Amino acid sequence: MRTNPGKMNGRPVEFSTNKPEHPSEILAIGTSDVYSVPQTMQIYRAVVTMSSKGFRRLPVCDAGTGRLRGLVTASDVVDLMGGGSRYNLVTGRHKGNMLAAINEPVKEIMSTDLETVHPADILPDVVDRIVETRTGGLPIVDDQDLLVGIITERDVLQVLTSYQSQSRVEDVMTTSLRVIGPDETIEGAGREMTRRNFRRLPVVSNDVLFGIVTAMDIMKYVGDGTIFTNMTTGSTDEVLGISVRTLMKGELLTTTPLENIGDAARYMLAKGVGALPVIEDSRLVGIITEYDMVCALRNEL
């Protein structure tokens, strides 16, 4: 594995917490102190919350009851930024003005058809749900639909890495890659992610890997204020027409085909990343993600 130094910025945000009264195996593995927001919160404020804390998803609950009503993910924000149906909020209601659109309430873009788990569920069943639904995180709700926690691929992977595996990265990596060039626009990258249901795309030029652009990178473009830099009109072209090379600010982390997947998973967890490009003879030959590793390791339970 190798690293190229970089940096990533954020700023603190205050949150309220929702603590469960009855801990369980799933709550112990996942997160029981859950940050949630009301449906009336502005999209921009929700994105700032996610960006500053590194959240890929944010539950949306009734302010009074705590009942789960939806979930906003980094992919939902990418969809809004030109990738899919949520982009209609920009082009239709706000006539192409992105800044006006992100001041709408978060209920306008949240996902409401949710997969959830119960505190009494057992880990193998939860892992199966994550794999079968290809869902990166599952809210944990009680019998009254009150949000009491959330469990993610990363939480599950943390448990699975305690088991020894004989599999190597080449056994589970994805080799049919979709890549983009460093001059691709943010809008183009978002459209490709949404169309393919991808959370990340390798950035390649002349067979050289420049980095990876993720849904989180695009979301942080909004949440850390970069979207406002040198902006005058707030039009879609002005906001989304810049190249993805401006988003690649973090470390470039890679692995090799012969790496044990347990070692690769521990490396990913230590670095806080959701995927690793796979390099052989200085050439990109695949990518391995948290989801790939959960799929490969779940039989160890």
Image (cartoon, rainbow, N blue to C red):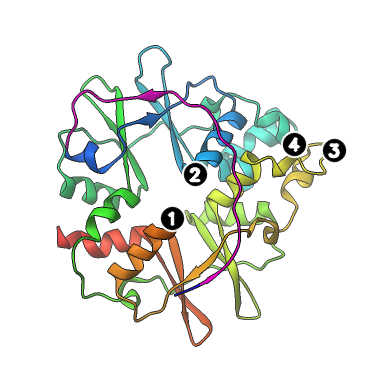
Residue at 47% from the left image edge and 53% from the top image edge? 197
Residue at 34% from the left image edge and 74% from the top image edge? 169
22 or 175, which lies in front? 22
Q: Which residues are magenta?
A: 3-24
Local crowd at mark 4 within 10 Å, few (<14), some, or many (≥20)?
some
Q: CA distance from mark 4 to mark 1?
A: 35 Å
Q: Looking at the image, is mark 2 or mark 3 nearer the viewer? A: 2
Up the image or down, 40 lies above or below 140; here it is above
Residue at 14% from the left image edge and 42% from the top image edge? 122
Find disc 3 in the rendering and name its residue.
232
For the residues labelled 4 and 1, say whether their Cβ atoms are less than 8 Å apart.
no
Mark 3 residue type? Thr
Residue 58 position by quadrant: top left
Find disc 4 in the rendering and name its residue.
96
For the residues labelled 2 and 3, say whether their Cβ atoms are less than 8 Å apart.
no
Find disc 2 in the rendering and name its residue.
54
Up the image or down, 201 lies above or below 205; here it is above
